[in-house]
Image: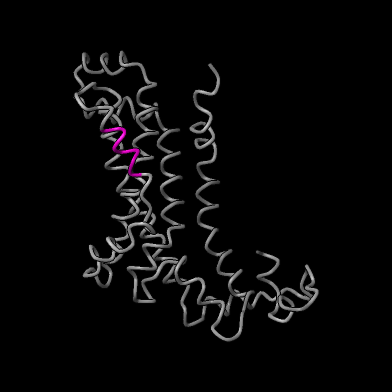
Amino acid sequence: MFVTSLKSRLEVTDIPPAYFPSRPHFENYVNVWSSEVNPAASLLSTVVIAGGATLLVLLVATPAAYYVARFRFPGRMVFLLLVLITQMLQPTVLAVGLFQEFKGWQGYAVWGALILINAAFNLSFAIWIMQAFFASVPKEIDEAALIDGLGRMQTMFRISLPLVWPGIVTAIVFVFVNSWNEYAAALILVQQTELQPLTVSMPRFLGLYIQDWQYLFTVALIAIVPVIILFSIIERRLIGGLTAGSVK
């Protein structure tokens, strides 16, 4: 993507195409950033939607996963199975229902609709993985904290959460990347071009009559930079979350 983003249009469409450009066209990045499509607005939209969905999932999934892992209540397995079943439903399948539900959400409210949709479709995975990590922490640790005078919420935040950070980080990455890449719901609901996330606005850089592939690759490269930064920051904790329990 980086090499192609530095080519001219003729160098991309030439037959046979040259792998490296005759000279790097860094002006492609300037042209893209100053274009009418406005990638800055699309990038802001994507960050708000992905960040909001991730935060909402953490706020809901953390206490839910903790409660499911620590308490045995009637219907516990039924609840977990119902949560898992929601993974079978994707935005594309529910396109008509989602449009009917949120068609009245206009302007910046559509970001709120996409945050709710992305959070709903990623909530089940977060609950499942986080409850497994909470369950791996011995209950005696919580009991000792309760005996020392901490409440249940204090025990969860001050004792349990620091011990399950790999699971939380794994859930954060999964939810954030899924929300960042979501396309179907955003395509259906967001009609205003200035509010569209990158996944929806990106094809407009290709052009209607002339295919400017170099611009499309330029925007694609810009789109993955925030995700790469996120991975680089939390890579060590992510690896710990993915490999936890692999050695007995």
Q: Magenta part mainly helix, strand or loop?
A: helix
Q: Give the camera-side residue of 29 and 220.
A: 220
Name the residue: 42% across, 66% down.
197
130 drawn magenta:
no
On the question of residue 130 being in view, the answer is yes
> In the picture shown, does residue 233 fall above or below 108?
above
Q: Residue at x 39, y 70 (%)?
A: 196
Q: Which residues are magenta?
A: 79-86
Nearer the observer, 45 or 95 = 95
Left or right of 208 in this view: 180: left
Residue 155, horizontal then vertical, whole percent? 26, 25
Say which quarter of the image contains residue 173. Answer: top left
Residue 127 percent location from the top left of the image: 34, 36
Q: Position of residue 8 (x, y in %)?
A: 70, 79
User: In this rendering, would 36 be left or right of 14?
Assistant: left
Q: Give the residue at x 40% y 62%.
A: 184
Classify residue 166 as left or right of residue 98: right
Q: Nearer the viewer, residue 192 or 77?
A: 77
Where residue 80 appears, as percent x and y from the top left, is 30, 32
* Left or right: residue 144 compared with residue 187: left
